[in-house]
Amino acid sequence: MFDLLPERLAWYIVGPSLGLLIVIFFLVLNQPLGASGAYVHSLKLFQRKAGVAVWRIWYFVGIFLGGILTTQILRDAGNIRSGYATMAEVIQGGPTIFIVFAGAIVMGYGAKVAGGCTSGHGMCGTSQRSAASMVATGTFMATAILTTLLIRILSGGDL
């Protein structure tokens, strides 16, 4: 499979394709495309609540299965970097699991407080010229840059 796409697709293919997909979703469904929205609708289905958009559940399942397929099933077929091996090598003693878990909690909380995830705000909200999405996206980016800088300083440049 990886012989078909041995390298990442170029930005000038992926970017416009994502933009076109977002426009099509707004034209056909009048809804934004976001990962946290897919999670929320999947959770609503399990809680048996009303107002579930079935396509969002399939989107969530696709994200999950795509990740499993790439990192677990097809990993021997190509040179894929999966997991947090570099972090585990640099930070000895096993706190990698705690760091990743804490990061996931913080990201989930941030998405809840912000009313959406980075993909929802960054791609869909800013394309709708939403002031809240622009502030949220700026906050996500500034936090990511500062966190990366802090990790580089603390790890001595190894991460």
Image (cartoon, helix red, strand yellow):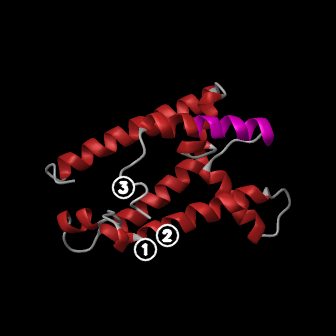
Q: Is residue 145 above or below residue 106?
A: above
- Tell me the residue that label 1 is attached to: 72
| Upstream in sequence: badge 1 or badge 3 | 3
- Tell me the residue that label 3 is attached to: 6
Q: Is residue 20 left or right of residue 108?
A: right
User: What separation in Å lies between label 3 and label 2 (alpha carbons)?
Assistant: 16 Å
- Tell me the residue that label 2 is attached to: 69
Check residue 60 for magenta coloring.
Answer: no
Residue 156 coordinates in the image, percent (x, y)? 13, 50
Q: Is residue 157 above or below residue 122?
A: below
Residue 98 coordinates in the image, percent (x, y)? 36, 68
Q: Is the magenta stretch mostly helix, strand or loop?
A: helix
How crowded is the residue under tag 1: few (<14 C-alpha within 10 Å), some, or many (20+)?
few
User: What separation in Å lies between label 2 and label 1 (alpha carbons)?
Assistant: 6 Å
Q: Give the magenta-colored segment's residue range.
A: 18-29
The three-letter amino acid code for the residue at tag 2 is Leu
Q: Which residue is drawn at 64% across and 44% down?
A: 115
The residue at the far front in this view is: 4
Q: In the rendered structure, are the residues bearing label 2 and label 1 in contact, judged by CB atoms less than 8 Å apart?
A: yes
Q: Which of 146 and 23 is in front in this view?
A: 23
Q: Is residue 117 above or below residue 137?
A: below
- Check disc 3 and report its element: helix, strand or loop: loop
